[in-house]
Image (tube, grey):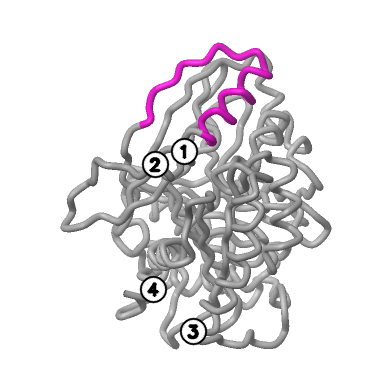
Amino acid sequence: MDRPELHLHILLDKLAESLISFAIYRLPWTDEPILVLQKEGEVEKSDNLHGVNGKKGFLFAPFQPNATHPVILIRPDIYAIGWNNIMQYLSDIYSDLSQIPASEPTGSSEEKELLSESTLRETYDKVFSDFITPLQKGTFDKLVLSRNATYPLREDFYIIDAFVTACNNYPRMMISLTHTPVSGTWIGSTPEIILSGQKPTWQTVALAGTMQLVDEQIPSEWSEKDQKEQLFVSDYIYNVLKSFKSKIEQNGPYTARAGNLVHLKTDFRFSLKKSKRLGDLLNALHPTPAVCGLPKDEAYRFILSHEGYDRSYYSGIIGWIDPEDITNLYVNLRCMHIDGKQTTLYAGGGILPSSTADSEWEETLFKMNVMKKCLGPDETFL
């Protein structure tokens, strides 16, 4: 994907510090960015995904909807495809940059403390111990442990540069840049569909298990741990779809590439008679065992009380929803929150009784590195 002209860089950075809500995203295997922008007013907010039933717009939902992190729907006052069209629309509306309504940054007014990798690892090991104990006792079949880490941004950082770099680095993924005064500014790169298609036929996937590519070779042998993890996710999704009395076609599991990582993937195609119930279906699917665990409700409560930090919009849902036309919704993985001169990155992995802290920590490094590579030269862990 080509980088847009400098004026658009400046305009989008200005919008990302304003009261204007917008999203720019690029679907996998395409080369055109799509802009969804709400010209004025607050975004629609709800405390659960049922609230998007029958509605159209750009959806941004958190891991745990609450007063601080509500389910957000950006109204598509502007829907434009391609940099030229995006530039034309934005220039027509915001010809005078000084007229863009500025907002206070979300979150803390002070910069977050930048912790060393050794401190981050020490904290992770303590939380891992809390997670592995109930797994080994058989209380849970699976738990997902995630973490975050904050890093300084380069002085010459532009959000659109990070977005375009992600598009060029990861053609197989859905790339997103989302900003609202409620959520702040997020950039993400995700391989995991939670719902796509158009009535009456829809698709979703089960994605679990992770390995790193070695010399661009896709591995074929998966550990018992990864295979079990994928089976948990697949069975869960199948049972949810059956509860909606859907006719289901299942394909997989098979190995699928996502950037420099590979995962085990199963595809599901299904029918849904009432497309206006997409919010109900999303509420039933989210969070899937791929980002939560099993049994789902108990794992969800355990994560909220033991993980030790707020996931915010990481591992939530992001993308375009339209019950009467095409929908493309993804799980918000491999993402970062831009806040002033800092960015906070997120990553996690499925924990089973056989998991080790060393291997799971390495997996979070690989996953965080997906987005850290988009911040500028030499911005990598490895």
Residue that mark 3 sits on = 118
**What amino acid type is highlighted by mark number 4?**
Leu
Instruction: Estimate the x, y position of residue 198 in percent, counting from the top left.
Output: 53, 23
Residue beneath label 1, please? 228
Q: Is residue 382 left or right of residue 302?
A: left
CB atoms at circles 1 and 4 under 8 Å apart?
A: no
Q: Residues within 10 Å of mark 1 (few under 14, many from 20)?
A: some
Asked which quadrant contains residue 244, the reply is top right
Say which element carries label 3: helix
| Front disc: 3 or 1 | 1
- Let me know if residue 245 is in the magenta part: yes
Viewer-nearest of labels 4 and 3? Answer: 3
Q: Nearer the viewer, mark 2 or mark 4?
A: 2
Q: Which residue is mark 2?
A: 224
Give the spatial CA distance, label 4 vs label 3. Answer: 39 Å
Residue beneath the point at 79% across and 62% down: 68
Q: Position of residue 99 (x, y in %)?
A: 66, 73
Mark 3–mark 1 Cα distance, whole angstroms, equals 31 Å
Residue 7 lies, in percent from the top left, at 43, 72
